[in-house]
Image: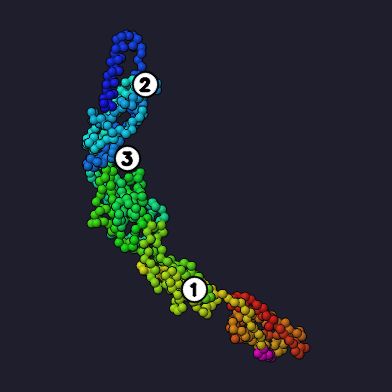
Amino acid sequence: MHTRSRYRMRYILIFSLVVVLSLAMGSLAMAITGDTTAPLVTNVVPIDGSTIYTNGSSTVYYQLGNTTPLVIKADYSDEVGGSGVDVNSVMVHLDGGNMLGNCPVQTTTHVECVATAADLFPGIHPLDIYVADIDGNLTMNRTWVTVTVDNAAPTYSNLTPADGSTILTSQLNSLSTNDMSALRIDYDLTDPAPSSGWSPMTHINESVPPGVAGAMISNTSCVKSPSSTDPTHYSCQMNRASKLKLGDNTLSILLKDKVGNTSSDYSNAATLKHYNVVDNVAPAVSGLTANVTTISANHSDPNPTGANSVNLNSGINAGTATVKVDGTTIITGCTATATGISCPTPSGLSVSPHTVEVTVVDTAGNTGTSTISYTPPCTPGKPSLSLSRQGTSWASYAEYLARELTVQLAVNNTGADAANSVAITGATSTNGVTLSTPVPIALGTVAGGASAATTVKYHVPVTTGSFKTSFTASASDTCGTSYTYPV
């Protein structure tokens, strides 16, 4: 016998027994009343007034996150101290007499029954939950649900960047998956009424079915922006695409509603959107160094920072790397590889700052440059200075009377390197002779192998027949080191 039929017979028998007792015992039966409160039914799913969507194929349903098969749920309980729920009494009915027989969960507090396609034809349906307690008190809880056919796929509009746009790799620089400041695809969604809701997925250069690993941009990198004020607007970050490449890229937007209606863009080659990705990021020159023998540097053509794809650089144009010193290209002796260049340092550079520049060009025509200042090392060496007398005379009769003797001197640089800031700083004489010319006497730079001439005057007393004089001097080498001389 069917479970529900056994319940109905038992209910009738209990009712008859109560009547007999009442007739036989009179007022005593009125005192033995037992449990008179029916169980309480709560948390019915679908809730009263719900809309259940189908795609018209009678196989797909959606409501509050449930998909085929639709599960009807309810909780129930008897009052504290009551006789308790009779599990065999629990029944779930659609449309009055249509009792659902597939109820895989049925306990003293909860029931779950599966509704079939035949149960959920379009229209308004009463949903009845029957529960009785052990003493036969019965509750019938009725809610109403509406089954609606949704057979129209969602659509999108206001796509940016527009079909045919050029995308520069410099725009693809973000490490965040959902960084709204990065380059992204934006679009608005519409699901024609009656709408079961949608789930967007965006694919670029995709060759596998939607949702399969390998999608260039999937819905995991799509965000609403912002959902609180614009719930139909979606953004997908393009630089997170793993298959984005230089040149032509195709975009398809797959829109799927909750009952399986799918937009045709994904499978229709005629509706694919095209984007031309252009490398405008300059090559990177790093590790530029210079010494007395070699100038060298590394170079590479980087991918945009944060981009998932490794196909977003055009590569170094072999042979374009050059090394310049003070604007002059080093022509001979250079060695170039796919990752760097080295050249001999030009000889004869002065001990002063020099500009060293390395440049390289990628195949897209972008130039990368690095520049440093290089000063050749200086080997300190004391300039070889000597002093010679070129002549002695009384310049005039007046100076003779004043006892002012003129002496012509030459400071000689017998070395190869220049002597800088040469100066006669003083003189010491014998027999009362004193130097009249103020010191220091600046002579400037005396090149290697050259001389600098100067004239000094001495005051020679009348009583002096002869005297000796010794000079002191100073100079610095090309490294800036200063020296003193007892010339």
Residue drawn at (59%, 77%), measured in percent from left and top?
379
Indicate whether 2 appears above or below 480. Answer: above
Question: Would you name the residue on which mark 2 appears?
Answer: 83
**Residue 11 horizontal side relative to residue 297, left or right:** left
The answer to whether residue 267 is left or right of residue 28 is: left
Eye-nearest disc, 1 or 2: 2
Q: Which element type, helix, strand or loop, lies under badge 3? A: loop
Counting residues from the start of the chain, the first of labels 3 and 2 encountered is 3
Read off the magenta span: 389-399
Mark sitting earlier along the chain (3/1)? 3
Marks 1 and 2, how far apart in space? 97 Å
The residue drawn where x is 30% and y is 54% is 208
Residue 313, percent from left and from top: 37, 64
Q: Quadrant of the C terminus?
A: bottom right
Point out which mark residue 145 bears.
none
Q: Quadrant of residue 82?
A: top left
Which amino acid lies under the numbered mark 3 shown in the image of this protein?
Answer: Gly
Q: Is residue 270 magenta?
A: no
Q: Residues within 10 Å of mark 3 (few under 14, many from 20)?
A: few
Query: Of label 1 and label 2, which has the lower sequence position?
Result: 2
**Crowd band around label 2 with a 10 angstrom C-alpha radius: few (<14), some (14–19), many (20+):** many
Q: Residue furthest right?
A: 463
